[in-house]
Image (tube, rainbow, N blue to C red):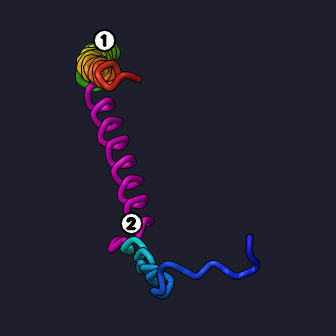
């Protein structure tokens, strides 16, 4: 064993890391064209208008047919709304079950 240093085999300069790639900062989301208070005002006006029309219709119906007509319209209206909501819930639930089964099948095929 000698005290002489071992000569280097490769005399090429050391590798240099490339500079990091700078990504631009994300742009903020675009500002809404219509202010939010406009939609709140429109919803309020619509709710008041619907309430006024229903009240006026009930008053006119009461003058023509009495309480029997009002209860008849109320019963038919609520049954109609129940039927519509039932159909919406059935369709929405079927779509959710379909989505669930698709995700389970994907999970099973991926091996998780």
Q: Which residue is mark 1?
A: 68
Q: Secondary structure at mark 2?
A: helix
- Does residue 56 show up magenta in the picture? yes
Task: Decide: is 71 above or below 26.
Answer: above
Q: Which residue is mark 2?
A: 38
In front: 17, or 96? 17
Residue 101's x, y, as percent?
Answer: 29, 17
Give the residue at x 31% y 11%.
Answer: 68
Task: Decide: is 39 above or below 67.
Answer: below
Prevalent SS, magenta region: helix
Give the residue at x 27% y 33%.
Answer: 57
Q: How far is the residue under mark 2 from the one under mark 1?
A: 41 Å
In this view of the protein, can residue 101 be seen by the observer? yes
Give the residue at x 31% y 13%.
Answer: 75
Dividing the image into 4 quarters, which one contains the N terminus?
Answer: bottom right
In front: 11, or 101? 11
Task: Decide: is 44 above or below 79.
Answer: below
- Does residue 105 show up magenta in the picture? no
Give, as a single range, the part of the protein colored magenta: 32-61
Give the residue at x 33% y 14%.
Answer: 71
Q: Which mark is residue 49?
A: none
In front: 74, or 102? 102
Task: Decide: is 94 above or below 42.
Answer: above
């Amino acid at each position: 064993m000698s005290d002489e240093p071992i000569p280097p085999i490769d005399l090429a300069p050391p590798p240099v890391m490339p500079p990091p790639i700078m990504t631009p900062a994300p742009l903020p989301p675009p500002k809404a064209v219509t202010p939010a208070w406009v939609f709140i005002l429109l919803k309020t006006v619509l709710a008041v208008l619907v309430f006024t029309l229903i009240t006026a219709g009930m008053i006119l119906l009461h003058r023509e047919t009495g309480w029997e007509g009002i209860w008849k319209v109320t019963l038919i209206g609520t049954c109609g709304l129940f039927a519509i909501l039932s159909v919406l819930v059935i369709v929405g639930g079927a779509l959710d079950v379909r989505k669930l089964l698709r995700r389970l099948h994907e999970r099973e095929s991926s091996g998780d």
